Amino acid sequence: MIRMHVPDMTCGGCAAAITRALQSADTQAQIQIDLPGHQVSVQSRLRADQVLNALKTAGFTPELQAA
């Protein structure tokens, strides 16, 4: 499980954009979003750097959290 803090995820539109970005990189990704806590958890075949890059490309500034 890859856990990230995404401080600039502020609304449902942001959460939807993050979900789309991650699922376009890995259609089988399982994504959990905690909007008030600005947390995203992803179970994916992608490496952590690939997940971070997908969110950065979508315009967000994710910070990897310790497992």
Image: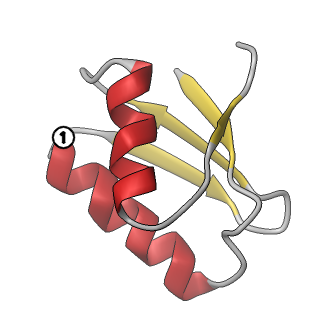
Residue 57 x %, y %: 34, 57
Where residue 53 sits, quadrant-wise, is top left
Residue appearing at x 61%, y 54% in the figure: 61
Q: Residue at x 37, y 65 (%)?
A: 58
Please tell me which residue is depicted at 70% across the width and 68% down the height of the picture: 8
Q: Relative to 53, does residue 34 appear above or below in the rendering?
A: below
* Residue 13 vertical placement versus 50 (above, below): below
Q: Is residue 38 left or right of residue 17?
A: right
Which residue is located at x 30 percent, y 60 percent? Answer: 21
On-image quarter of the C terminus: top right
Q: Residue furthest right?
A: 37
Front residue of this view, candidates 55 and 45:
55
Q: Position of residue 3 (x, y in %)?
A: 63, 31
Residue 22 at what x, y percent from top left? 31, 51
Of 64 and 38, the residue lying toward us: 64
Q: Provide the residue designation for mark 1.
A: 26
